[in-house]
Amino acid sequence: MNRESEISNKLEELKTLNEVGNLLVSSLDQHIVRKRVMEAITKVLRVEAGSLLMVDENNKEVYFEVALGDKSDMVKEIRLKMGEGIAGWVAEHGEPLMIQDVMKDTRFYKKADKKTDFVTRNILCVPVKIKDKIIGVLQAINRIDGGFTQDDISLFEMFSNHVAIALDNARLYEDVKEAFIDIAETLAEAIEKRDPYTGGHTRRVVNYSLAIAEHMNMSEKEKEMLKFSAVLHDIGKIGVDDSVLRKHGPLTREEFNIMKKHPLYGVEILGHVKQLKDLIPGMFAHHERPDGEGYPIGLKEDEIPLTARIISAADALDAITTNRPYRKGLSLKTAVEEIKRCGGTQFDASVVEAFIKSFEKGEIAMLMSQSDEGRRI
């Protein structure tokens, strides 16, 4: 390799290393990020295939988290015992391996090639560590322009350090998210305990909302935001007096005006918690209407966040079909007709369309049959 090519390759390596670093902090959707990172790594190392394997401590195995190359889906079915194969050996010993001819190494796991009809010639494998604890391994397979070098090991180990940091951050994020979910569900339960006639309401609204979302081309992140917004959609009712919240009959105009303030109370509550602020729009606007006749501030059409528009329909569905002290819940068929009739005025037309699709597939009926708390049917 001439000097000019060598410099060009080094610049490409630095560029990719920076790209990988940016990728790993760019998104909380770690599965997508890891796949893109492996794509960048295989490109700069000029290899035919690459993979990230994670350690399963409970079963003392390693499994494929990300696999790139021909028939990668088949590779993902393989699990190796610690110490088994080259990846298992690296996971067990925590040392990198560079093997120029796998057929001369007794550690090579031939069954993987046999299962996928792939021909492995050489492998570079390095451990992924967090504070000296081995959590996985990175593999680069079949260098396109010859064998691996010591420089490749150093570069691969730098990539491994980046991946380790990202995996640790993802773990911390999951811990925070789980704690948040616990808090959200506890708050929702506190509301329902104050109003025994709506027992299970929050859970049903969450389920109906997610069923609708499945027919609206929403991303996983958007659906997650919808779920949490639905969990907390009635959080503001904590600020509504029991004489109104627990009333057995229809509300008077004055009482209804008091009830209409609960989205505002919700803003006051969620606004003090940094992790919950992104949920405010969906919670705050779930009683708004496309025709501007909703509350608390009369938003119209696209001024209403999509999460709120979905929760609005799900909330209405449960209100129509659930027993109340002053009336018996109506049938699902009646609820569907009512929601369809109010499409474009009370409910967003695209949400109604998605709701109808979910209903026609039997998803709504199935969810109803799974929940019998406070139900009318």
Image (cartoon, grey):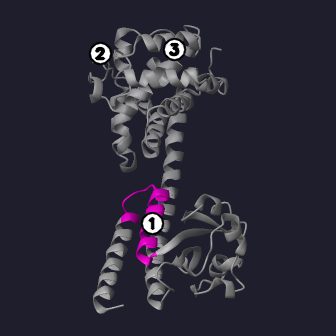
Quarter of the rendering containing residue 58: bottom right
> Picture coordinates of residue 253 (x, y %)?
35, 9
The quadrant of the image that shows the C terminus is: top right
- As helix, strand or loop, the secondary structure at mark 1 comes to helix
Q: Is residue 345 left or right of residue 110?
A: left
> Picture coordinates of residue 347 (x, y %)?
38, 19
Q: Residues within 10 Å of mark 3 (few under 14, many from 20)?
A: some
Residue 42 shown in magenta: yes
Residue 156 shown in magenta: no
The residue that disc 2 covers is 293
Count of labels in the image: 3
The residue that disc 1 covers is 39
The residue that disc 3 covers is 336
Could you tell which of marks 2 and 1 lies nearer the N-terminus? 1
User: Mark 2: which amino acid?
Assistant: Glu
Distance between the Cα atoms at labels 1 and 3?
47 Å
* Residue shown at 27% from the left, 88% from the top: 4
